[in-house]
């Protein structure tokens, strides 16, 4: 995953092993207490359930899903979680081995990240599960007990590697490329041998994590590909049955995957699977994902897969560490509601998109069990994060990554994206891995209603819609009648200018209208949205276009604004004004906004006229597209029943030709 999302059990290992395992990047002979014989040949076979009693989620079957489609869950933090006291349960709430629970619910693979040495010189873990080779071996053996294969995710770093950083392990940082290539080969080989010795069954190995052009401190494709090739060679030798995967992020970036695949092809990197992260809130559309993966598969004859995905089942945080997505997150695409059904639909749709891709072999859910370690305060949580590495980073990580992890260390940023609730009980969405094969024709019900917003002027009518679009459990929208709170309406009507929330009910669903009440505006059609012919424009030169335009993207608010443009030089000059009459006595403020470009030499100002003469001006700037400038004139004195004319003057020479611009949102408010 991209950011600092992101546990521990050093206790199981002796301190001497720990320190030894870190020196010079060597792996120690730790973890030998996990005997291969304990699990080998005794894999418990768990048959997936076809019809799930009691599951109330609506889920559409994914057509043409191959029988051997990989259903993975990244469980890297599980041991640190358990060490911190987290108990994972079955659907009845009874404690049950989480690996068994996952196998029962259609999961086929467990993904685990591997860092070279996520510890400081005193043996304190950096956090994020403190996932080293020993941890991977332990997870591998526990997974194998239930027939689950491992996806081993080598970061070739001592801590998080993602598009933002790809730091070399501390023990390798002074090595040249040849030296790093040797270490990558050795570390990969020894780690895989350790996993196999512990009874783990390796299904796939990633040589790097989200390596968008960098890996292990190398930032050239020659360097990246050389290291990938070294890792790949070790996988082929130790686990000839396993698939070799490369892993990238940001499928939404036009041309990026085609470029990455070409770079690898040109340098003959030996791999089987081109893997991608796909977080629905960051990574573009599903159609694009299918398309860019299919393109790589067809061009280079590769298998493709989604190696990381996740979605929130609740907007709420449970561990006092803010989450990657919540109701407060801006700048993301909220494709699904933050509910268990929304999470189920999100996962189902990613499975479908990956299965549709040419060469699509699977999907892996990222950190499906990174839930709160418990505690009533951040401090209580923090103690465990620090001690067991169960947060995304501990304070000890400062020794390695002082500017990010060492500064912002804390808990889980994805506890609301887990497939288990905060008590460790699996959510119904965990059953999606099975349900996608059959579908679940539960009754289609209303799932969520989008909030609406409304801006009115003080004293104006609060025109709330009678119906709102409700999102159904099958992802389709349908109008539903709303009963709005009379009490909330009354409050907003009598409260004057300000922000209000008016609650409502659409059936069982809560609906909210965010209402902004503006001060009374004495101008009519202030935002050019209406039909009234109250604005007068005088063309003082040969301005070619002067009219109200309906184009939301170019409007400050609403969908319309006043537009001007000319192709010819020195042709733009005009005024736009409105007279407000019969005003109550008092002092008034006036403002109007403009944006535009290619103005050349220009003169532009807001003005106030009284008795036909301009009495006040406020200069305004015409700069670039999207940069609105507001001209404001304050303290306009008007006698009882008086009138005032307000307007804007624009004259442009045009740079290279004519100039253009947009005028919107004029206000004449009473100042006192
Ligand atoms: Ca959290």
Image (cartoon, rainbow, N blue to C red):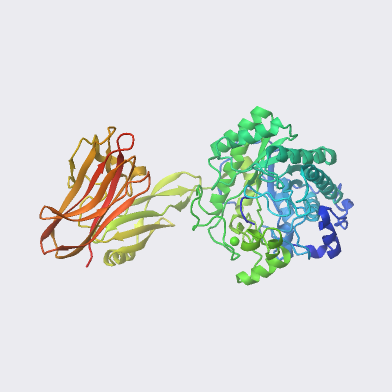
The x and y percentages for residue 410 are 63, 63
Residue 409 visible at all: no
Number of numbered markers: 0
From this view, report whether residue 26 is shown above or below residue 379: above
Height in image: 118 above or below 66?
A: below
Which quadrant of the rendered structure holds the C terminus?
bottom left
Name the quadrant where ligand 1 sits: bottom right
> Looking at this rendering, what residue extends furthest in the front direction?
601
**Image spot of residue 245 (x, y percent):** 72, 39
Is 445 situated left or right of 12 in this image? Answer: left
Asked if residue 583 is positioned above or below residue 379 in the image, the reply reads above
* Viewer-closest of 161 and 24: 24
What's the residue at 65%, 59% (across, down)?
405
- Residue at horizontal 31 percent and vertical 34 percent from the top: 657
x, y percent for residue 79: 74, 59
* Residue 632 location, quadrant: bottom left
In the foreground, 268 or 101: 268
Q: Position of residue 466 (x, y in %)?
A: 32, 52
Q: Could one spot residue 244 in this view of the protein?
A: yes
Looking at the rendering, which quadrant does residue 170 occupy? bottom right
User: Closer to the camera, 146 or 318?
Assistant: 318
């Amino acid at each position: 995953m991209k950011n600092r999302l992101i546990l521990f059990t050093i206790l199981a290992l002796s301190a001497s092993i720990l320190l030894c395992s870190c020196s010079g990047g060597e792996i120690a002979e730790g973890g030998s207490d996990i005997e291969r014989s304990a699990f080998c040949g005794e894999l418990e076979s768990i048959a997936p359930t076809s019809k799930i009693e009691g599951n109330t989620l609506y889920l559409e079957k994914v057509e043409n899903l191959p029988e051997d489609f990989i259903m993975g869950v990244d469980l890297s933090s599980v041991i640190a979680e358990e060490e911190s006291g987290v108990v994972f349960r079955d659907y009845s709430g009874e404690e049950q081995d989480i690996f068994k629970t996952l196998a029962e619910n259609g999961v086929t693979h467990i993904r685990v990240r591997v860092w070279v040495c996520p510890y400081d010189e005193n043996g304190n873990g950096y956090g994020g599960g403190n996932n080293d080779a020993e941890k991977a071996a332990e997870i591998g053996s526990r997974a194998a007990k239930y027939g689950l294969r491992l996806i081993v995710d080598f970061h070739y770093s001592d801590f998080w590697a993602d598009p933002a950083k790809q730091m070399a392990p501390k023990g390798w940082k002074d090595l040249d490329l040849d030296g790093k290539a040797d270490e990558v080969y050795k570390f990969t080989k020894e780690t895989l041998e350790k996993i196999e010795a512990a009874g783990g069954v390796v299904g796939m190995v990633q040589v790097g994590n989200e390596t968008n052009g960098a890996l292990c401190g190398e930032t050239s494709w020659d360097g990246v590909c050389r290291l990938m090739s070294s890792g790949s060679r070790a996988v082929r030798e130790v686990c000839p049955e396993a698939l070799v995967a490369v892993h990238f992020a940001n499928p939404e970036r036009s041309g990026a995957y085609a470029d990455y695949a070409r770079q690898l092809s040109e340098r003959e990197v030996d791999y089987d699977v081109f893997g991608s992260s796909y977080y629905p809130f960051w990574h573009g559309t599903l159609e694009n994902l299918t398309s860019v993966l299919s393109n790589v598969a067809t061009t280079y004859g590769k298998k493709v897969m989604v190696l990381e995905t996740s979605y929130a089942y609740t907007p709420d945080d449970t561990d006092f560490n803010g989450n990657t997505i919540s109701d407060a997150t801006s700048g993301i695409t909220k494709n699904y509601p933050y509910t268990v059904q929304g999470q189920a639909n999100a996962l189902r749709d990613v499975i479908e998109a990956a299965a549709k891709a040419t060469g699509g072999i699977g999907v892996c859910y990222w950190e499906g069990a990174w839930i709160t370690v418990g505690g009533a305060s951040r401090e209580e949580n923090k103690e465990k994060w620090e001690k067991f590495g169960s947060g995304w980073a501990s304070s000890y990580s400062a020794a390695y990554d002082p500017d990010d992890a060492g500064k912002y260390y804390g808990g889980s940023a994805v506890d609301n994206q887990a497939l288990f609730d905060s008590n460790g009980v699996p959510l119904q969405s965990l059953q999606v891995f099975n349900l996608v094969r059959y579908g679940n024709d539960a009754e289609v019900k209303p799932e969520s209603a989008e909030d609406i917003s409304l801006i009115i002027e003080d004293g104006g009518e609060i025109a709330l819609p009678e119906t709102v679009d409700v999102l159904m459990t099958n992802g389709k929208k349908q109008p539903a009648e709303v009963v709005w709170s009379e009490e909330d309406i009354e409050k907003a009507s009598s409260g004057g200018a300000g922000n209000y929330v008016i609650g409502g009910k659409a059936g069982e669903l809560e609906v909210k209208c965010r209402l902004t009440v503006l001060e009374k505006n004495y101008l009519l059609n202030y935002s050019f949205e209406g039909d009234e012919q109250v604005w007068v424009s005088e063309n003082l030169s040969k301005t070619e276009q002067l009219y109200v335009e309906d184009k939301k993207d170019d409007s400050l608010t609403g969908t319309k604004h006043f537009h001007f443009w000319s192709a010819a030089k020195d042709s733009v000059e005009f005024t736009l004004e409105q007279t407000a009459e019969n005003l109550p006595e008092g002092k008034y403020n006036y403002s109007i906004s403009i944006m535009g470009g290619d103005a050349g030499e220009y003169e532009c100002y807001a003005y106030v006229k009284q008795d036909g003469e301009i009495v006040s001006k406020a200069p305004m700037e015409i700069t670039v597209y999207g940069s609105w400038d507001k001209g404001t004139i304050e303290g306009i004195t008007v006698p009882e029943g008086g009138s005032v004319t307000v307007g804007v003057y624009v004259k442009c020479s045009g740079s290279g030709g004519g100039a253009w611009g947009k005028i919107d949102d004029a206000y004449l408010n009473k100042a006192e």
